[in-house]
Image (cartoon, rainbow, N blue to C red):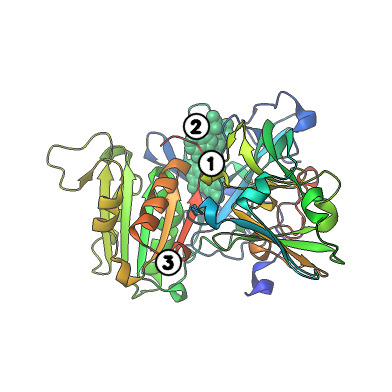
Amino acid sequence: MAVTRGFLGRRPSDSSRVPPGQYVTRDFPVLSAGPTPSTRLDDWDFTLRGSVESPVSWSWAEFQALPREKFTVDIHCVTKWTKLDMPWSGVSLDTLLSAVPTPASHALAFSDGGYTTNIPLADLRGGKAWIVDEYDGRPLDPEHGGPARLLVPHLYFWKSAKWIRGLNLLTEDQPGFWERYGYHNYGDPWKEQRYYGD
Amino acid sequence: MERTALLRRLTWQTGTVIATTFETPRVRTITFAVPDWHGHRAGQHLDVRLTAPDGYQTQRSYSIASGPEDDHLSITVERLDDGEVSSYLVDELRAGDELEFRGPIGGHFVWENATGGPLFLVAGGSGLVPLRSMLRHHRATSSQVPVRVLCSARSLELLIYRQELMELAASPLVDVSITLTREAPEDWAGYRGRIDSMLLSEAGWPISAEPLTYVCGPTAFVETAAAGLVSMGHDPGRIRTERFGGTGM
Ligand SMILES: Cc1cc2nc3c(=O)[nH]c(=O)nc-3n(C[C@H](O)[C@H](O)[C@H](O)COP(=O)(O)OP(=O)(O)OC[C@H]3O[C@@H](n4cnc5c(N)ncnc54)[C@H](O)[C@@H]3O)c2cc1C
């Protein structure tokens, strides 16, 4: 390992919760490839389509009526920040996916603004992923993905698609936006799967 | 999409610092020689990795400041007061030191001659870094794409690449506007104050020109500029953004 001359560095206070190469921030930084879209709640819906008998959609009101979960997780962004103990609330993907039988193995999340990202379906099931519309007890800010975003805390944050509008359920994996630009296909922060080939 | 061209395994490399130049008292350009570099596209960034004697490592992203046609690779780093990596790079690193990095990274916030225009480049503070690489590429390829540049800086002294911007503005194809947000010389003929819709429409292109816009800087700056352009009626699909982080300006 090449030591950098003159560098001492700061250590994270709790390294067991901070993946390699990450630092802890108190801010809630923003990463997106373009401007923040604004979708009226009247026009919003969430759709499961692709390998399903017929697509299922929830309007904003229908989505609000689904059983909710409140939970606190750590988030790791590929731009190197980690934020600990982030309080969210939303609907578990187990709840949403139980509405449609599907032979799919993967999902391509799609969002307002054209963003997409791919995730194995197994990573969205079993209490590991949500569609969240509240952060810290308040409606999610547009710049952080409001009205609703996907949240998959065990993967790098770009997998947690902002401004989500649905999942395309697929029987074969298909890379999304950043994945086509050379980011890792899966994105496990604990294995530092940042870029293609990591 | 040219998937094969974009997807190449990124390995850590070591560059040797050959020069460091202060752009302002807090901002330094670091130029390094790299034995094996496959080139980059204007707008891409690098990841820098620092290692302490006990093995502790940390990484940060820095945009590539040099043009694709330049002889050496460089980055320009702004020192944040309590910044772990930026204070090292600005205060401590010196010529002869070795720096570990990998890249180039990113395929969206890039501009090449073939990407077309007209171009509108909007920079807040050190957000000028990747846009300077685009401007150098524009010049090196004698691009005929018309460019308008809008830079926001606290004061004229704190504007990075001042000299180079003046030289670029000599081209009939490149228009440079500068707004100073805190302090301006008495005889200042440029803009004053933070960017808003008025300034974006004066310094930028009319909607009918269908410009391709790149906005870069601290998060709050990028949010304001991009939202302003969209609310004026510009196509969000032709606005590309790079947020450097931080919440303030
Ligand atoms: C794609 C990309 C390209 C970038 N290119 C450049 C570049 O060309 N030049 C450059 O100087 N920086 C650039 N940055 C920012 C850079 O990666 C670091 O975030 C920055 O240098 C701060 O790191 P640090 O270790 O010094 O500060 P840290 O120790 O990480 O943070 C210190 C404090 O500053 C806050 N902070 C972190 N980043 C910023 C910021 N950008 N602005 C204001 N406050 C902040 C933190 O929340 C914290 O409170 C880029 C970031 C990205 C994601």
Q: Earlier in the sequence, mark 2 or mark 3?
A: 2
Report x, y in % for residue A57: 69, 60
Q: Chain of mark 1?
A: A
The crowding category of the residue bearing disc 3, from other C-alpha atoms within 10 Å (few below 14, some 14 to 19, many at least 20), is many
Q: Chain of mark 2?
A: B
Which residue is at a point 23% across and 69% down the rendered structure image? B172
Three-letter code for the amino acid on which mark 1 is drawn: Asp
Alpha carbon distance from label 1 to label 3 = 37 Å
Q: Would you place residue A171 above or below residue A43 in this image?
A: below
Q: Are marks 2 and 3 on the same chain?
A: yes
Residue type for callout 2: Asp
Q: Is mark 2 within 8 Å of ligand 1?
A: no
Check disc 3 and give the amino acid type: His
Q: Which residue is mark 1?
A: A141
Which residue lies under the disc numbered 2? B91
Badge number at residue B137 = 3
Query: For the residue labelled by badge 1, is the local secondary structure a helix, a strand or a loop?
Result: loop
Q: Is mark 1 within 8 Å of ligand 1?
A: no
Q: How far from the left and from the top, in percent, is residue B194? A: 30, 42
**Chain under numbered label 3:** B
Please identify the quadrant where the C terminus of chain A is shown: bottom right
Which residue is depicted at the point 66% across and 45% down?
A64
Determine the residue positioned at 48% across, 32% down. Answer: B80
Check whether the beta carbons of the residues at disc 2 and disc 3 lie within 8 A of each other.
no
